[in-house]
Amino acid sequence: MIAGELDIAAAQQEALARAWPLPAVATDITAAHGRVLAEAPRARWDLPGADVATMDGWALRSVDLTAQGPRVRLRRRGESAAGHPYGELLGEGEALRISTGAVLPPGADAVVAQEDCAVQGEQLEVDLERVGAFGPGHFVRAAGSDVAAGATLLPAGALLGPGELALLAGCGHSLVHVHRAPRVAILCTGDELVPVGAWPQRGQVVSANGLMLAWQARAAGAEVVDLGIARDEPGELRLAIERGTGEDIDVLVTCGGISVGDHDLVLPTLIGLGATLVFRRVRLRPGRPTTLLELARAGSSPIPVFALPGNPASAHVAFELFVRPMLRRFSGHVRWQRPQQQVVLTQACSRDPRRAHVIRAAIVGDRATPLPDQTSGALRSIAGHDALIELAPGTGPAEAGTSATALLLGGP
């Protein structure tokens, strides 16, 4: 265990040190968006597969346009359209109508634009002055000029977006090998919790944190196993944790019951199951009680267990700062960080003299407006923001106009 409270960066590194890209799985390309390649796929054919026209016009032999004079007359042949190539050899002094994307006929090595030509019966008159500089390959995209057969399409570790998926599909791949998505078990604890949809009685609250954390995990690329609610009873809590640390689970996240009160049973229950502490607290507001443990499993690697505080802002911030980076690393992402942006605070915001204060803010351009309520227990303090801003420890507020670095969470 690391002694004392860790700062945010040190706690992140402890989390990342316990994550590695998960094994590869074959995935249909239609379901691979946002995943990370576990191998470097190669092109199965040339792209394009043949010489094709890049302009509507006429395919011909470039040598036939070397005659003296401003115009050249050629004999017209048939047509090559996209998807309907012309298979006969184009002979000396002949021209073939061709469409953009259509295959050049055998014998042709260039295309002239249709606006540089005039059709006169069975002949084509080419205006050489309009054509200008001309030679083999004019308005032609050569076979394999985009991708050659056998070429590496993308490196292992590449993130698959729409363009990457189109490239893979266009070069013959319908299945891709990507790193397996991590499976995250989420357990909320506390006698005061009732499920989403239930009407809370006096002293009860809806277990909104479970819903929040599940969507944060999915947004990070994980699969979620919802363990529901465990009461503040050692036996029930132990059974729930055991369900959440099975060999098919990669990370367990608990929420609540991690402080030092008489009813905070999560830490002693985990220790009783054999878990070892990695760190116990972080110099962070909100989220100071955030704890990371490892629990050994027979026949499998140890499972990391994040024990998050029960206040919604604390859980939300701690997940973003520590759990999400681990999940991204498990998914194979090289860049586990959220994008960052330099911003200017539009309002003063309090700082903490002993620990970093991570505020929730809404950003427009380079202006960051802190949410009016930064209370860790207030649900309003995590709704309507799209950035986290870390304010270093200090006395007195960070005044309006202060420059800061914002962690961008993305749109709603």
Image (cartoon, rainbow, N blue to C red):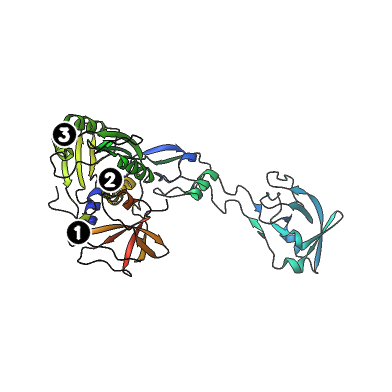
Question: Of the numbered discs in the image, which one, if any, rests on residue 273?
Answer: 3
Q: Which of marks 2 and 3 is in front?
A: 3
Real-space CA distance between mark 1 and mark 2, rounded to the nearest whole angstrom:
26 Å
Q: Is residue 64 or residue 411 the one in the foreground?
A: 411
Of residues 43 and 54, the one nearer the viewer is 54
User: Which dot marks residue 241?
Assistant: none
Under circle 1, the secondary element is loop
Side of 289 relative to 79 (left or right)? left
Q: Which of 195 and 62 is in front in this view?
A: 195
Quick check: 120 above or below 129? above
Q: Which of 356 and 163 is in front in this view?
A: 356
Residue 370 quadrant: bottom left
Q: Is residue 317 left or right of residue 100?
A: left
Residue indicated by mark 2: 19
Q: Which residue in the structure is indicated by mark 1? A: 355
The answer to whether residue 91 is left or right of residue 169 is right
The residue drawn where x is 57% and y is 49% is: 47
Decide which of tag 2 and tag 3 comes sooner along the chain.
2
- Within 10 Å of disc 1 (Cα), the crowding (few <14, some 14-19, many 20+) is many
> In the rendered view, would you say 314 is above or below 243?
below
- Kind of residue sitting beneath label 2: Ala
Badge 2 density bin: few <14, some 14–19, many ≥20, Cα 10 Å: many
Give the farthest residue toward the right. 121
**Percent coordinates x, y for residue 29 in the rendering:** 48, 40
| 10 Å crowding of disc 3: few (<14), some (14-19), many (20+) | some
Q: CA gap, disc 3 to disc 1?
A: 31 Å
Q: Inspect this view and state whether residue 146 appears.
A: yes
Q: What is the three-letter code of the residue carrying label 3? A: Leu
What's under tag 1, amino acid-wise?
Arg
Alpha-carbon span between mark 2 and mark 3? 22 Å
**Place of residue 56 in the rendered image (x, y in percent of width and height, measured from the top left):** 71, 55
